[in-house]
Amino acid sequence: MRYLLGMLFIASSALGKDFSVYDPKSLNLAISSAQPGDSITVEEGEYINIDILFVGTGTVEAPITLRARTPGKTILTGSSTLRIGGSYLVVDGFCFRNPDSTISDLIQFRKDSKQLASHCRMTNCAIESSLVADKTKESRWVGVYGSENRIDHCNFSGKSGKGTTFVVWLGNGSDGKHRIDHNYFGPREALGSNGGETIRIGDSKTSLLDANCIVEKNLFEKCNGEAECISNKSCGNTYRENTFIEVGGTLTLRHGNRCLVEKNLFFGNDAKGTGGIRIIGEDHVVRDNYLERLTGDDARSAICLMMGIPNSPANGYFQVRRALIQNNTIVDCKHPILIGLRDAKDASLEPIETLFKGNRVSCPNYTIVEARSKMDGVSWEENLFMGKSLGIKNEAGIKVGNPQTPAAQPIARSQVGATWHDAVVK
């Protein structure tokens, strides 16, 4: 009787069939039977150690949807995993709670290396943990493969241990062009070593490939895993209108070229080690960002330009070339601008063909610019700075005065994350 109930469905000529499922067996049968426009609804309850393989082919007008009966009350625990393989598939309303930290990949946008996800979506879901992970084992929560997928209005909170929270993979059929928007990335404890990023797009080996991903309107709060909260390792990505609150790390353009960082908000609230934007590579544009009360120094300075390595290996530091840093506002940050940070002994190439234009800095108690390299390749236009000292000789493109810096407002908590989350958690 339980199995028969599990396969109960209601036909709808307009919306397709709705399969109601209660257990792994009925779920697998429903997935194998689903057609474009159909929905598979998983009933409320806790599902322990379940491996969900959601494969299928929907259409843009009629995707196949896998959803929780009541968002947030279909809970996946233990060693449960999810793989999404196919096209036009939607996952909606699930909660992964305290996932097993020894699992290398919790959610993957692929069935396997041959069947990747394209035009798929995960929305209104959450992954959250209060467990202390084994720091010797690497575990990632979300791995995005394929092309043109979307992850939106989800919660990711409490990740600990080694392994990036959210990774976009490139190459071998994965072309990027994903959209990551309106998510809440909550507290992550400091790892004490590399491997604690919240988001990474690409890796060293694929860093010169175009990913063309959009990361926008997300909220990052106390994501303190390591120095790189976001680690860009590919080309052509856009990071815009995100809010960072008390994040002990930076948005780092670590590898790759031609990225756009615009209209992001950084609020340090004087918390220890809070950082801004770090620039490495060519043809990046960093504009219209707001950075306030950040305390980090060196790589965690509000805006930091790195030194490059001659003939740099893929995992090294490429010279900053043709960077445009424009119309950014920096308020009461301890280390507003650092040019020429050296993170490798053989890093000898200072930034060149780089322009600071129209930036406003109001940090009356701090030195505005710290130069650790030659400044011949850096030019200034229409900047207005106020600080304890300028830190460099007064260039023609820098005016000393009190800039107008109206306070910015972070993205509202109600605009990001799963719509059900706070009510269910409370």
Image (cartoon, helix red, strand yellow):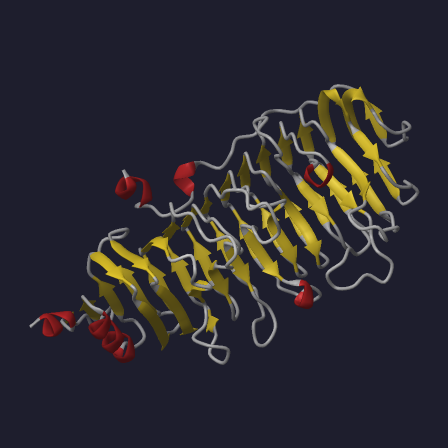
Q: Quadrant of the C terminus?
A: top left
> In screen coordinates, is 41 left or right of 344?
left
Residue 201's image quarter?
A: bottom right
Total labels drawn: 0
Instruction: Tell which of 355 and 422 is nearer to you.
Output: 422
Q: Quadrant of the N terminus?
A: bottom left
> In screen coordinates, is 162 left or right of 313?
left
Residue 16's image quarter?
A: bottom left
Percent x, y of residue 7 = 16, 73
Q: Is residue 111 above or below residue 71?
A: below
Q: Residue at x 59, y 49 (%)?
A: 230
Percent x, y of residue 165 = 50, 54
Q: Is residue 176 above or below residue 326?
A: below
Instruction: Tell which of 318 and 11 is nearer to you.
Output: 318
Instruction: Tell which of 386 and 368 is nearer to you.
Output: 368
Percent x, y of residue 343 = 77, 47
Q: Residue at x 49, y 37 (%)?
A: 411
Q: Is residue 347 above or below residue 39?
A: above
Q: Residue 264: in sight, yes or no?
A: yes
Residue 278's image quarter?
A: top right
Q: Residue at x 63, y 46 (%)?
A: 251
Q: Residue 62: in sight, yes or no?
A: no
Percent x, y of residue 4 = 10, 74
